[in-house]
Image (spheres, rainbow, N blue to C red):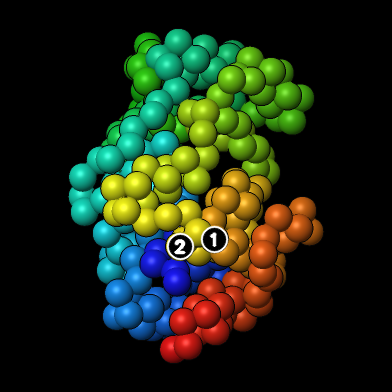
């Protein structure tokens, strides 16, 4: 019997227009009425996750790729990038002429603030000295060659690269954060369903009782899942939940 569901946000519960559709919301609410816990697992911060989590009535969030986990508004898991690594990477990014964003809890600092929803909380203009503190996430906008150099500097940290930027998270994964939550809830890994579409979802897809890959995931991600559903523009999450929980 499944007792908890953890959902990725971007490319999973959101369609390609970054919309959370009513059909997805309704399906999740029906699952919750059956007593199933539904949590969000994302690289986003709590603020950027709650935009959708509030609509879904979630009380469980594995944010910053699992490094900061909230259960009923309380922190139950908290792992950070060291101050030295954070400062060194932001400093190198600055020397390259790039943009850095340093995230810590509900604060973000940047040499060139960007105002995009997925980058909440909005960054404050910051000097390099302001980044000499622990971080939950670093977003570094530099070219591919520069990203390659910096990745070699953080082999001990979890690194996730996407598009035109390098995302750096503490060592661990979404599943690491999920584990801290289910242990408190006395839920076993085999009682957990996870749904996602990205490389940073692979460990939770492999480790949960039922790992579901979205139709818009890469072949590699799909190969790590137990089940593949429709893409995020064709109600993949809603249809998966309806099938599994017979709603």
**Farthest residue toward the left?**
73
239 or 161: which is nearer to us?
239
Q: Indicate the position of residue 224 as horizontal and vertical percent values.
A: 71, 55
Q: Position of residue 226 (x, y in %)?
A: 67, 64
> From where the camera sits, is residue 194 visible?
no
Farthest residue to the bottom: give it: 247
Q: Which residue is tagged 2?
A: 191
Helix, strand, or loop for circle 2? helix
Compared to 103, does 66 lie above or below? below
Q: Is residue 226 left or right of 117 when viewed as pictured?
A: right
Q: Quadrant of the C terminus?
A: bottom left
Residue at coordinates 30% horizontally, 74% vertically from top-left? 35
Kindly indicate whether the residue at mark 2 contacts the one at mark 1 (C-beta within 8 angstroms). yes
Please state the total of marks drawn on the protein image: 2
Is label 1 in a helix, a strand or a loop?
loop
Does 41 appear above or below 2?
above
Residue 193 visible (yes or no): yes
> What residue did someone put label 1 on?
209
Residue at image point 42% right, 82% down:
27
**Considering only order in the chain, which callout, 2 or 1, is on the residue closer to the N terminus?**
2
Cα distance in 3D space between marks 1 and 2: 6 Å
**In this view, 82 is above or below 226:** above
* Residue for point 21% across, 50% down: 73
Residue 72 point in image, percent of width and height: 21, 54
Mark 2 crowd level (few <14, some 14–19, many ≥20, 10 Å Cα): some
Res. 23 image quadrant: bottom left
Instruction: Tell which of 181 and 145 is nearer to you.
Output: 181
Q: Residues within 10 Å of mark 1 (few under 14, many from 20)?
A: some
Assign the N terminus to one quadrant of the image. bottom left
Residue 185 occupies quadrant: bottom left
The image position of residue 210, as x and y in percent, is: 57, 64
> Considering only vertical position in the picture, is 46 above or below 26?
above
């Amino acid at each position: 019997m499944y007792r908890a569901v953890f959902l990725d946000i971007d490319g999973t519960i959101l369609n390609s227009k970054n919309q959370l559709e009513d059909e997805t919301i309704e399906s999740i609410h029906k699952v919750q009425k059956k007593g199933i816990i539904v949590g969000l697992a994302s690289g986003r911060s709590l603020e950027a996750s709650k935009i959708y989590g509030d609509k879904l009535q979630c009380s469980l969030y594995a944010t910053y790729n699992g490094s900061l986990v909230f259960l009923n508004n309380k922190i139950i898991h908290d792992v950070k990038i060291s101050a030295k690594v954070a400062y060194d990477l932001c400093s190198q990014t600055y020397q390259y002429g790039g943009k850095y964003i340093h995230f810590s809890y509900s604060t973000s600092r940047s040499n060139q603030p960007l105002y995009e929803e997925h980058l909440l909380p909005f960054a404050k203009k910051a000097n390099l000295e302001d980044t000499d503190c622990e971080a939950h996430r670093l977003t570094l906008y530099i070219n591919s060659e520069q990203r390659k150099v910096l990745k070699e500097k953080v082999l001990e940290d979890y690194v996730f690269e996407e598009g035109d930027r390098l995302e750096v998270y503490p060592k661990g994964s979404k599943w690491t954060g999920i584990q801290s939550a289910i242990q408190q809830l006395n839920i076993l890994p085999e009682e957990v369903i996870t749904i996602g579409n990205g490389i940073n979802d692979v460990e939770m897809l492999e480790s949960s009782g039922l790992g579901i890959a979205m139709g818009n995931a890469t072949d590699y991600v799909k190969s790590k899942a137990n089940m593949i559903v429709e893409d995020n523009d064709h109600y993949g999450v809603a249809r998966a939940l309806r099938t599994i929980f017979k709603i």
